[in-house]
């Protein structure tokens, strides 16, 4: 039997790290693309380095030559194209870079496969997004809902979606898009709203931060757990025909609801007062020193020029055709997992910082050599 060889772009990201674990457990040989950085940003996959079937290679989504050479060397049977400038707000500040990586980058991967004559043996998964629905034209959104991208990120991802479809039809390639709704975890980047909230709730509960500043509290998202979603990426490539799928939980919540629940799990009950930019989250009960204090406030800095405010996915097709369970981890469990992790992280960071301070003092006094 021929070996399953996966190449993952974006291996150092939230999804790349979970997908690597998932595929290694299935016996795959896993290759990941990393890019050079002046500091080490590989903490999500550090625990996998040294695993016999796990290999890392330098390449970049902006460098066709590196992708062509790597695909030729690895000879993958499956490519998971997860690499992206994935932050919607950042895409307004760096639209050209976002287009290069998130749009043309997809084309580079497809052409790397064709250049190496692997189009009949290598399946490709493209990390598409619910952001394509943008200024939504219907709720909930399914595979037939019209797209209306509403940020430079979403416009770039729309190109990725269509070029995948084009190569599927033009060259009979097995390439598919997973239209994934927001999925979060304890490995989520710290500037996405969920992780920003869970980390801040943990810091505020432990006296390390005074206030959390957020943007649009009314924004609605369909939030799932990233660990559950990577299974779907794999299932999409194991399906008997190449098709696109919506992956979502089918349940929607506001940013405000996420924050209320996150603070609750950190031991703080909030009440909300005011509207728009004047809205505040005030402590009703929790640590005595915090009661009556404003711990959440709104800052216009986090408003977007155009904001996507009503994402709600319909995962019926994935459920029926892939046998995937969208409710493996509930919203309540997801928030609890993230807060528990961040409460422990903040406490551990505190211990480490006290130890560093003590060590510096001991060294200064000549108490340790
Ligand atoms: P993430 O944590 O931001 O990870 C992005 C990955 O892309 C990182 O490994 C990053 O590498 C890599 N990357 C960025 N630019 C690159 C370049 N020029 N060359 C090579 N690698 C590059 O994102 P994620 O949450 O795991 O999401 C994975 C994919 O799914 C993305 O394409 C995202 O747009 C899409 N998506 C995510 C969600 C979600 O809710 N998480 C929903 C729908 C779609 P560095 O570590 O070096 O920066
Ligand atoms: N990041 C952030 N920071 N968002 C905030 C804040 C804040 O302080 N306050 C409110 N929000 C609102 C945003 O305006 C948006 O409406 C919502 O919270 C979610 O923002 P993000 O967590 O940044 O995620 P996103 O939905 O824009 O994008 C993520 O999900 C997409 C799938 O729908 C990313 O992972 C994308 O890569 C992914 O495609």
Image: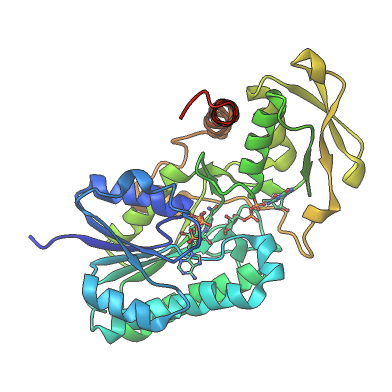
In the image, farthest residue toward the front: 366
Give the quadrant of the N terminus.
bottom left
Q: Position of residue 57 (x, y in %)?
A: 32, 66
Q: Residue at x 23, y 84 (%)?
A: 117
Q: Is residue 240 above or below residue 181?
A: below
Residue 42 spot, x, y in % from top left: 43, 52
Residue 168 visible to the viewer: no
Residue 161 at what x, y percent from top left? 49, 72
Q: Is residue 58 left or right of residue 363?
A: left
- In this rendering, the answer to whether 156 lies above or below 28 is below
Residue at 69% from the left image edge and 61% from the top image edge: 89
Residue positioned 34% across, 46% down in the render: 323
Decide if residue 7 is on the left or right side of residue 99.
left
- Identify the residue at horizontal 81%, vertical 17% (top origin): 289
Nearest the viewer among 233 and 87 is 87
Can residue 189 be seen here? The reply is: yes
């Amino acid at each position: 039997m021929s070996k399953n060889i996966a190449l993952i772009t974006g291996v150092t990201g939230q999804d790349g790290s979970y997908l690597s674990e998932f595929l290694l457990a299935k016996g795959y040989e896993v290759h990941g693309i990393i890019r050079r950085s002046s500091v080490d940003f590989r903490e999500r996959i550090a625990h996998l380095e040294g695993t016999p079937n796990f290999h890392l290679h330098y390449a970049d989504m902006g460098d066709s030559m590196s992708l062509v050479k790597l695909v030729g060397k690895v000879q993958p049977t499956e490519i998971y194209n997860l690499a992206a400038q994935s932050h919607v707000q950042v895409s307004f500040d760096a639209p050209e870079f976002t287009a290069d990586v998130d749009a043309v980058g997809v084309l580079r991967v497809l052409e790397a496969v064709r250049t190496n004559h692997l189009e009949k043996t290598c399946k490709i998964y493209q990390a598409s997004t619910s952001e394509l629905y943008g200024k939504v034209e219907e709720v909930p959104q399914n595979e037939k809902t019209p797209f209306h991208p509403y940020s430079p990120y979403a416009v770039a991802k729309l190109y990725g979606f269509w070029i995948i479809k084009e190569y599927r039809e033009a060259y009979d390639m097995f390439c598919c898009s997973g239209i994934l709704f927001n999925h979060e975890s304890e490995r989520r980047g710290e500037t996405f709203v969920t992780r920003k909230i869970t980390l801040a709730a943990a810091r505020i509960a432990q006296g390390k931060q005074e206030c959390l500043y957020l943007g649009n509290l009314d924004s609605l998202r369909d939030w799932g757990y990233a660990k559950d979603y990577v299974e779907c990426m794999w299932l999409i490539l194991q399906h008997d025909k190449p098709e696109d799928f919506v992956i979502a939980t089918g349940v929607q919540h506001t940013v405000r609801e996420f924050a209320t629940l996150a603070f609750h799990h950190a031991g703080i009950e909030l009440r909300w007062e005011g509207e728009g930019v004047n809205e505040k989250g005030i402590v009703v009960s929790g640590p005595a020193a915090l009661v009556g204090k404003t711990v959440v406030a709104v800052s216009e800095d986090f408003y977007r020029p155009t904001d996507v405010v009503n994402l709600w996915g319909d995962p019926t097709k994935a459920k029926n055709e892939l046998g995937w369970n969208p409710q493996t981890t509930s919203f309540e469990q997801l928030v609890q997992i993230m807060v528990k992790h961040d409460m422990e992280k903040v406490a551990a960071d505190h211990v480490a910082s006290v130890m560093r301070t003590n060590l510096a003092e001991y060294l200064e006094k000549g108490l340790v050599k």
